[in-house]
Image (tube, helix red, strand yellow):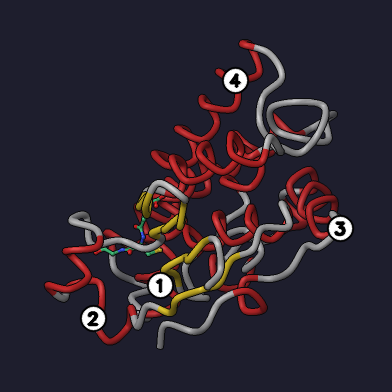
Amino acid sequence: MAEFDLHCFAESGNSYKAALMLQLSGADWQPVGVEFFKGATRSPEYRELNIMGEAPVLIHHRADGDFTLSQSGAILIYLARHFSKFGHKSESEEFEILRWVLFDNHKLTSYTATERFMRHFQKKVDDPAAQFIYARAQGAWKVLEAHLAGRDWVAADRPTIADFSLCGYLFWPEQIEMDQAEFPAIAAWLGRLRALPGWAAPEELMPSGM
Ligand SMILES: N[C@@H](CCC(=O)N[C@@H](CS)C(=O)NCC(=O)O)C(=O)O
């Protein structure tokens, strides 16, 4: 048995945030596939695992029993503490990281994941709601672009869990309809993430949820 199980699926950028952290930390972990597109997260069994009905869910098999956690931001903070990697080194870094993880969850990932789901997977390109959400996603990308101009990493002078949170959906520029020519600082930052030792794409780390 691996030390960590991650309930996840390859199309899930939220799952990818946790999978990437496990991968880059050299964790002993295994993905447990969630058949999301067949409705798995709505099943009573899944709601037993996570009442929120979402992936990812991390299970840490510890000497004192299994510890189960959902919410990619909470998982990232837990893993950074466990491995003493990709976390803060000062109080100001701690809150800078938290600030960007919260911004990611509220503004960047939530709109990006939803516009991708509606426009790419459901093909609702002309849907006014999808267009509104796409515009909101682009607004969040502009914030990240402005922040990354002139700096290598989001919250410190090295990669942290804030970077892993924000990048969750951004390695799919075609699917989210991001023209990276308009976001050169984001494109360069994604290149730096790709160059980290052990980096792997979502599809290499997790099974498809189709
Ligand atoms: N804020 C959550 C979002 C998780 C989330 O929305 N996961 C998606 C898959 S990427 C999901 O399971 N959605 C099911 C639903 O919303 O019903 C996190 O960061 O973990």
Which amino acid, mark 4?
Glu
Please, which residue is most extreme toward the top here? Answer: 91
Question: Crowding near pointer 1: few (<14 within 10 Å), some, many (20+)?
Answer: some
Amino acid on which disc 3 is placed? Pro
Mark 4 to mark 3 CA distance (whole Å) = 24 Å
Residue position marked by numbered label 1 in the rendering: 119
Compare marks 2 and 4 and give the one earlier in the sequence: 2
Point out the tag, 1 or 3, that comes first from the N-terminus. Answer: 1
Mark 1 is on which residue type? Arg
At mark 4, the secondary structure is helix
| The label number, if any, that marks residue 197 in the structure image | 3
Q: Is residue 49 above or below residue 151?
A: below
Provide the secondary structure element on which disc 3 rests: loop
The amino acid marked with disc number 2 is Gly
Q: Where is residue 107 drawn, in percent x and y?
A: 43, 40
Q: Choose between 11 and 45: the one closer to the eye.
A: 45
Local crowd at mark 4 within 10 Å, few (<14), some, or many (≥20)? some
Q: Could you give the CA–CA distance between mark 1 and mark 2, rounded to whole angstroms? A: 19 Å
Q: Which residue is mark 2?
A: 39
- Ligand number 1: quarter of image: bottom left
Say which of marks 1 and 4 sits in front. Answer: 4
Q: Is mark 1 within 8 Å of ligand 1?
A: no
Q: Position of residue 89 (x, y in %)?
A: 71, 19
| Upstream in sequence: badge 4 or badge 3 | 4
The reply to whether callout 1 and callout 3 are in contact (CB within 8 Å) is no
Q: Quadrant of the C terminus?
A: bottom left
Indicate which disc residue 60 carries. Answer: none
Mark 1 secondary-structure assignment: helix
Residue 45 appears left or right of 134: left
Image point (40%, 51%), residue name = 111
Task: Give the vertical position of 163 relative to 98 (above or below).
Answer: below
